[in-house]
Image (cartoon, grey):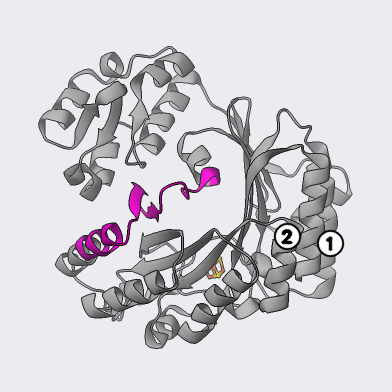
Amino acid sequence: MDDLGLYVHVPFCLRKCAYCSFYSETGLPPDKGKAYLTAVTRQLRQFSSIRPLTSIFFGGGTPTMLPPAVLSSLLAECRQHFPCAEDAEISIEVNPATVDCSGLTMLRQAGFNRLSIGVQSLHDQELRRIGRPHSATDAIQTAHLARQAGFANVNIDLMYGLPDQTLQTWQDSLAQALALTPQHLSLYELTLEQNTPFARQHAQGVLLLPDEDTVLRMLEETQRMLSGAGFCRYEISNYALPGFECRHNINYWQNGEYIGLGPGAVSCLGGIRRNAVADVGAFCQLMETGQAVWQDEERLESEAAFRETVIMGLRMTAGVSLPELRRRFGIDAEIYYGTTLVQLIQHGMLEIIVDRQLRLTEQGLLLANTAMAELV
Ligand code: SF4
């Protein structure tokens, strides 16, 4: 049976990081938290269960801005309303500045079985520069507390290509992160998003970023250190020990079905993708007055869904299965893309391997955006 994910968006943060363009609000007054909770609980009851959930993901924002008891009862509501597969992956993102030992223990006991820690760097100077509200020591402490709380599946998020970051400090952050023995690492290159402080600083010429060669060497060093530690790169930015690949995200990259709860969350069910309004106040009011919360609704035509599935699937190092694409969409990718695909293969960007998997080559992974632009 196909996977079905549930995403709960908690759009509150202690403060805004300088690179972030995700929808979230700063601070959390108690009445707003209460209204948010009531609205999300109402929204989840509007969905009927079509099959058991295979993953649940509480993300944000910073979910742990809500007290652990509130998160636990929200998870209980979700599991009461939707049947859940026995082996469902249940993740929560945490910011090291917002959790302690008893809170993590409560989350583990509530049923969260995967913890994703937003670390970003293990250098205080870099953390300050990007506007994170925690220190390297806080992050290390959180990873240790996660173990004590009983989490056996821990992800650490790190970023490279940061202002003032050097190859040496990146290697050092990676080495320190590996020493914390996570099962999964998400490693994101800094991108300058519109309307962020970093985009403005860049426009003013005051953002000193590592040059392209240094970023490339950071990536090479990442590959060397992580493969040496037994990690497999299974997606452009994600590495896992065998068996710890993130099921929830794989469902996105396979263009599967998912339900999104909360302001700004996206749902994709039955070929329809819908976006909830990205504003806590408006979202709560719409829910309270029984109106639809969707600000966008799009029916995905078969051909558009096919192309999306190819593009998203190529993010994974396993690539996409050509027979599976034909089964899902009735389209033969080799005929559909014709000479474009042949040329990408001839230029060493793509390859078709055993079981007719189409995937990016090593070189293609370095130039993924260029390769994908040809297939959009
Ligand atoms: S904590 Fe995460 S969601 Fe919040 S501002 Fe920072 S990067 Fe964005």
Of the 4 image quadrants, the one containing the N terminus is top right
* Residue type pointed to by label 2: Val
Q: Is residue 102 above or below residue 135?
A: above
Q: Position of residue 3 (x, y in %)?
A: 59, 33
Q: Is residue 274 above or below residue 287?
A: above
Of the 4 image quadrants, the one containing the C terminus is top left
- Visible in this render: residue 132? no
Q: Position of residue 105 (x, y in %)?
A: 71, 70
Residue at image mark 1 = 35
Q: Nearer the viewer, residue 173 or 332?
A: 173
Q: Nearer the viewer, residue 254 or 208?
A: 254
Q: Secondary structure at mark 1?
A: helix
- Visible in this render: residue 64? yes
Query: In the image, which is nearer the foreground, mark 2 or mark 1?
Result: 1
What's the mark number on residue 280?
2
Q: Which region shows up in magenta? A: 220-248
Disc 2 packing (10 Å; few <14; some 14–19; many ≥20): many
The answer to which quarter of the image holds residue 319 is top left
The answer to which quarter of the image holds residue 269 is top right
Disc 1 packing (10 Å; few <14; some 14–19; many ≥20): some
Q: Is residue 272 above or below residue 329?
A: below
Q: Position of residue 4 (x, y in %)?
A: 62, 35
Residue drawn at 27 percent across, 74 percent down = 171
Question: How many numbered markers are drawn?
Answer: 2
Q: Secondary structure at mark 2?
A: helix
